[in-house]
Image: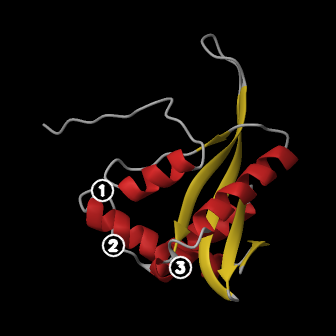
Amino acid sequence: MIHIHQTHDYELLASLNREVQEHHHFLYPDVFKPYDKDTVLPFYKEALKNKGYAFVADFDNKPAGYVLLFIKELPENLFQYAQHFLLIDQIGTLKDFRGKGIASALLQKAAEFAKENGTNQMRLNHWTMNENAGALFLKNGFTYFNENMWKYL
């Protein structure tokens, strides 16, 4: 059974981030650093102090995944209207719990949180080689609206 709850436990979030960070480091070792809990702990502590919101999914009373969210307000400018949306900054499910609907449940919780906070839009990004993440997001109704590219010289 999946149970999702809000958390302020930055140490738990830092631990749950391990597999996400290691996966990104594996896919893009020239971009992502190896996981180091002591290094990421202050990030989560500060994020939760500065308008970051985190939810943890427990499966059979064991932490199985998390999502880190930020409510974003972009002011109107000469080119674009003002924007108000929920940014899904990070989401991850531990390997032992994948395929059980945990990430989808976390995305649903994020959608509920977005509506509760007056927005009807969620945004996220994922790295191209993380094909499982892309498939998950498409399956959960996300569509592409902006793509980044790079070129090494």
Residue found 49% across the figure and 45% down from its top: 125
Q: Residue furthest left?
A: 153
Q: Nearer the viewer, residue 150 or 141?
A: 141
Which residue sits furthest bottom?
61
Q: If the image is split into quadrants, where does the C terminus sit?
A: top left
Q: Quadrant of residue 53?
A: bottom right
Dot 1 amino acid type = Val
Q: List x then y, in percent, for residue 131.
A: 36, 54
- Residue 14 locus on image (x, y percent): 55, 76
User: Residue 66: horizontal and vertical position, in percent?
Assistant: 62, 69
The residue that label 1 is drawn on is 31
Q: CA distance from mark 3 to mark 1?
A: 27 Å
Residue type, mark 3 in image: Phe
**Residue type highlighted by circle 2:** Pro
Q: Secondary structure at mark 2?
A: loop
Residue 97's tag is 3
What residue is at 77 percent from the left and 37 percent from the top?
A: 120
**Residue 97 vertical placement versus 46 (above, below):** below
Task: Choose top left, top right, bottom left or bottom right for residue 90.
Answer: bottom right
Residue at the spot 69% in from the left edge and 17% down from the top edge: 81
In this rendering, position of residue 72 left or right of residue 29 = right
The tag earlier along the polypeptide, 2 or 3, is 2
Between label 3 and label 1, give the one nearer the viewer: 3
Relative image position of residue 103 (x, y in whole percent)? 59, 64
The residue singled out by tag 2 in the image is 34
Q: Nearer the viewer, residue 42 or 101?
A: 101
Q: Nearer the viewer, mark 2 or mark 3?
A: 3
Q: In screen coordinates, is 153 left or right of 63?
A: left
